[in-house]
Amino acid sequence: MIRRGPWAFVLRLIFLAALAALWEAAVVYFELPAYVVPAPSKVAYALYQGIESEVYTAHLYVTVSETLLGFALGCVLAFVLGSVIALSRTVEYYLQPLVVMFQAMPKVALIPIMVIWFGLGMTSKVVSAALVAFFPLMVNTIVGLRSADEDRVNLMRSLAASRWQIFRMLQLPGAMPYVFAGLEIAMIFALIGAIVAELIGAEKGLGMLMQSMNFNMDVAGQFSILFILAILGLILNEFISIVRRRVLFWDRSRDADVPSARKGDS
Amino acid sequence: MDPIVDPSARRVSQGQAADVIAVRELSLTYGRGAARIAALRDISFRIADGELVVVVGPSGCGKSTLLKILAGLLSPTEGAAELKGQPITGPRRDIGVVFQTPVLFPWRTVVGNVMLPADVQRLDRGAMQRRALDLLGQVGLGGFERRYPRELSGGMQQRVGIVRALLHDPAILLMDEPFGALDAMTRETMNVELQRIWMARRTTVLFITHSIAEAVFLADRVIVLTPRPGAISDQFEVELPRPRTLEVMNTERFGHHVRRVRAALNAQGAGLE
């Protein structure tokens, strides 16, 4: 059905260019004001200006730092807590009501409180990113560690393996496909957490920049930042994918590289 | 071809002291009260050193349960199982288990999978690595050491499973329908192969199957188990000379043993393939 190859790729580019041209033509034809719908050329110009003046790069650096720090913090906590819950029925029993409650709650709704608690600086953004990134990885860690096949557990037990050995040699590597699916979601979620926190109140960052543009009716500028955020999300996601392919060389279930079902909420 | 193994003769000469496995009046019941289900009832048998004993029975006769007890994965409700005179109360290092499926770890190479017992039991890596490569060569997997399980056929994977169970030189090899998942032709090839490996090493083996032909082909001694609750209905020596070839299945003596197993099963009203 879909023809692949260089010619198809060129067609794809032509298709996207045609869409942009159509958009441009529509803006001119209907005389849409730039503060409602900016033409692609205006967006491209705003992007060029923002990058050339190094305004965007400074804010981009802040947002990326917050996202990566929040991702790291949230993932370390999620992995540790997920492991403890997966291994201890007692801990699971006492934590389950809390986990269920927090899972059902849209985590972004907590971000305004984080800004009050941790201020307008980077801390509240890192905490927000961590908070949103935390749950998908924790849930996937629990499911992954519990996914160990009964025969494999029996094999380990028949060799007189300790519980720690079963964890280290069987459960942990077996959980990696789940963990990496969780990490991919967590990375994008961390970016969402950081941006939302910046929209609510910040001194720096792309979200804060968008917010100030919004006050100035600079829609072209906002579109240009959305474009940057889309590229950023792609790069962060690709980074996890590269690590996953190296670690999970043995896992063929995702060779097709179908985007994982983005379960969760934000 | 002389009979290389004559279990009855050896049992007389070695006596009970050489028994690797001694099972006495073993019973196992699942559940409690009205929901009690007796899986095994009053099972007693011995396995001499170097003997290949096959337990044959239909699905649900508790043969896998029996194997799990011997592997220390389950505790019997009554009676006791001993390995070399020591009661089996939990998993032991001197037992090797081969499961119905190969149960390989996809993130480990072939040799990595074989080395699992060495890793778990912290055995000398250098010596075990040499032994692993040697064993893999013996089962025709030389050259596949660095491959991953998914690159191997079902039969090759199960050979890896057998080699892994042999790595730490266990006192007994417990095999739970190891070829049940293979196609009929591969299964016969694997039976010949197993006999060859066994004759070279003389490891004591308890082999579980629901195939009568497989049981008679492999066994020094066959134990017939009937279901619900699993109980021994017959037990006899198979004195066919070794190495046996697949042609032995066409002989009258082979047919005689097959009929005897079937009679033992039918006596209890149990249907079998």
Image (tube, grey):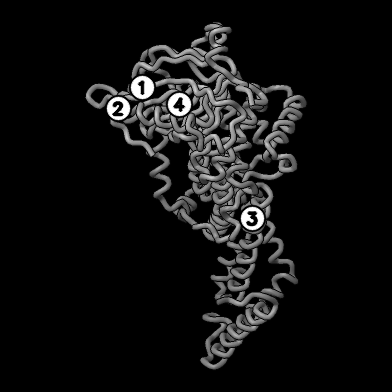
The type of residue carrying mark 4 is Val
Q: Are marks 1 and 2 in contact (CB under 8 Å)?
A: yes
Q: Secondary structure at mark 1?
A: strand
Vertical relation: B240 (above or below) A77: above
The type of residue carrying mark 1 is Ser
Report the Cα–Cα distance between label 3 and label 2.
Answer: 59 Å
Is residue A243 something that shows in the picture? yes
* Relative depth, front residue between B146 and B158: B158
In the picture of the structure, the residue carrying the numbered disc 2 is B268
Q: Residues within 10 Å of mark 2 (few under 14, many from 20)?
A: few
State the image coordinates of residue A91 (x, y, percent, origin top left).
Answer: 44, 30
State the image coordinates of residue B143 (x, y, percent, origin top left).
Answer: 75, 42
Q: Are marks 4 and 1 in contact (CB under 8 Å)?
A: no
In the picture of the structure, the residue carrying the numbered disc 3 is A241
In the picture of the structure, the residue carrying the numbered disc 1 is B233
Check the residue under mark 4 and report the chain it is in: B
Residue B140 — which label? none
Check the residue under mark 2 and report the chain it is in: B
Labels 4 and 1 within one chain? yes
Q: Residues within 10 Å of mark 1 (few under 14, many from 20)?
A: some
The type of residue carrying mark 2 is Gln
Q: Secondary structure at mark 2?
A: loop
In the picture of the structure, the residue carrying the numbered disc 4 is B55
Determine the residue positioned at 70% across, 36% down. Answer: B111
Report the Cα–Cα distance between label 3 and label 4.
Answer: 49 Å
Query: In which quadrant is the N terminus of chain A drawn?
Result: bottom right
Labels 3 and 2 within one chain? no
Report the Cα–Cα distance between label 4 and label 1.
Answer: 11 Å
